[in-house]
Image: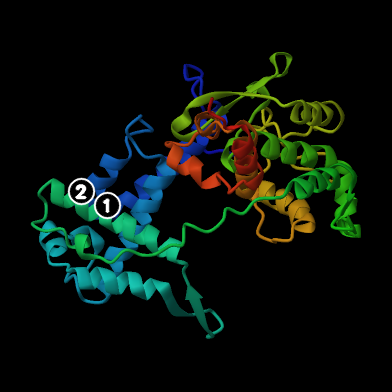
């Protein structure tokens, strides 16, 4: 049951479920800030201003708060900062932190040992990308402190750059794998790479009650390149089927009109007409588009993000040679295919809601067919 209730006087066009989720996240952020140093509170207030145009989104603010808090707490534990608690940290203590202290902390996060509840020593490790994120969060905090003259020097300028191998090829499904995953979600079987693939006996038991829903979910990801959070928040009231469009709310709650493809519209209409529960829906989830199944026909609720992720993996891992296919990889598949077909990086950028074409450009592949065609059509007279 939700702890928040939307006022009847609410005039926002943002759906109730998104407003409630934002309130829950804001509560988490406020809780983290409550024990933070005064300067960190100011920095987070600078980063996040209630989803304003010049503000980071609240998930980013939470990430920065957690990373910086963990960093400062580690320095207290190591005796580098001589205070008893985070709330006692002043600009003077931060100004005494040197680049070696920061680098040692980041290096220690690369691989470390933790004793679990059974007394076993478990080795944990972080990827270069995760370490780079930690460095970015710390660097952002120190840069802000320096620019606002809270500290006399910015020691993060001396940190060595972490190589993240961002030049690797973007992981996507092939055309054959896309069609096979759609067929598998529609029928429970498919053929790919000369092999007959099918769901397990246990999976087939649930499949008969959820196949139209699952097929619609895969279709929405594949044909529209949605983020998982965007699909999660789609409501019945988001749909304008007679116009062939649906509305989503992107980062910073920007409302965006999307056009159905013939395939996704057909899959969704089939789900709505023949499978979507009409009764037994949990209070507060009546407007949700994608609902969980229920053996007793009651307590249907909005699918969680984790449930959606598992649905995608159930079908894609069976048809792909790479087991790491996720909803985001379906988004990458859409991006790559869109660029291949249209060649218009700006339209694809807008469709995917990328802040710049630099992000979209990652999905450009070395297309031998296109290069051959260009060599044949370019002439001068």
Find residue 369 and report its image quarter. Answer: top right
Q: Percent x, y for residue 12?
A: 47, 20
Q: Percent x, y for residue 247?
A: 60, 24
Question: Residue at the front extreme?
Answer: 381
Q: Which residue is pictured at 60% across the width and 42% down the height?
A: 371
Q: Which residue is pictured at 54% across the width and 25% down the height?
A: 381
Whether residue 232 is visible, yes or no, is no
Q: CA distance from mark 1 to mark 2?
A: 6 Å
Q: Quadrant of the N terminus?
A: top right
Under circle 2, the secondary element is helix
Q: Which residue is pictured at 20% across the width and 48% down the height?
A: 144
Left or right of 68? Residue 144 is left
Whether residue 100 is visible, yes or no, is yes
Q: Percent x, y for residue 123?
A: 50, 80
Left or right of 23? Residue 92 is left
Under circle 1, the secondary element is helix
When the figure is inspected, residue 306 is found, relative to residue 209, above or below; the finding is below
Q: Are marks 1 and 2 in contact (CB under 8 Å)?
A: yes
Q: Nearer the viewer, residue 256 or 290?
A: 256
Residue carrying label 1: 140
Left or right of 86? Residue 48 is right
Classed neighbour count for the residue bearing mark 1: other residues with Cα under 10 Å, few (<14), some (14–19), many (≥20): some
The disc placed on residue 172 is none
Residue carrying label 2: 144
């Amino acid at each position: 049951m939700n702890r928040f209730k939307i006022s009847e006087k609410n005039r926002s066009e943002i759906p109730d479920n998104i407003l409630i989720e934002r309130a829950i996240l804001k509560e988490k952020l406020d809780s983290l800030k409550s024990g933070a140093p005064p300067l960190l509170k100011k920095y987070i207030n600078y980063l996040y201003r209630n989803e304003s145009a010049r503000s980071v989104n609240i998930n980013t603010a939470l990430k920065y708060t957690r990373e910086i808090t963990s960093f400062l707490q580690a320095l207290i534990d190591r005796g580098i900062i001589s205070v008893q608690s985070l709330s006692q940290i002043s600009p003077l203590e931060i100004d005494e932190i040197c680049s070696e202290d920061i680098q040692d902390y980041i290096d220690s996060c690369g691989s470390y040992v933790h004793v679990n509840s059974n007394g076993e020593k478990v080795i944990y490790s972080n990827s270069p990308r995760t370490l780079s994120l930690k460095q970015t969060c710390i660097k952002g905090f120190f840069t802000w402190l320096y620019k606002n003259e809270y500290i006399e020097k910015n020691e993060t300028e001396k940190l060595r750059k972490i190589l993240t191998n961002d030049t690797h090829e973007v992981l996507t499904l092939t055309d054959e794998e896309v069609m096979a995953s759609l067929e598998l979600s529609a029928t429970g079987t498919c053929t790919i790479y000369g092999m007959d693939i099918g769901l397990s006996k246990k999976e087939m038991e649930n499949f008969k009650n959820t196949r139209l829903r699952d097929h619609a979910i895969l279709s929405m990801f594949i044909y529209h390149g949605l983020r998982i959070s965007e699909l999660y928040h789609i409501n019945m009231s988001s749909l304008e089927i007679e116009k062939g469009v649906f509305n989503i709310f992107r980062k910073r709650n920007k409302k965006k009109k999307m056009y159905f493809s013939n395939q996704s519209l057909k899959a969704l209409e089939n789900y709505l007409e023949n499978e979507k529960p009409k009764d037994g829906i949990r209070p507060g989830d009546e407007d949700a588009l994608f609902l969980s199944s229920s053996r007793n026909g009651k307590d249907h609720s909005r699918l969680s993000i984790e449930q959606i992720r598992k649905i995608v993996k159930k079908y894609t891992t069976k048809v792909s040679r790479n087991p790491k296919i996720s909803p985001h990889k379906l988004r990458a598949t859409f991006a790559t295919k869109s660029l291949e077909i249209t060649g218009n990086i700006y339209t694809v950028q807008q469709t995917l809601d990328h802040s710049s074409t630099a992000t979209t450009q990652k999905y450009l592949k070395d297309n031998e067919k296109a290069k051959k065609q260009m060599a044949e059509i370019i002439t001068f007279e």
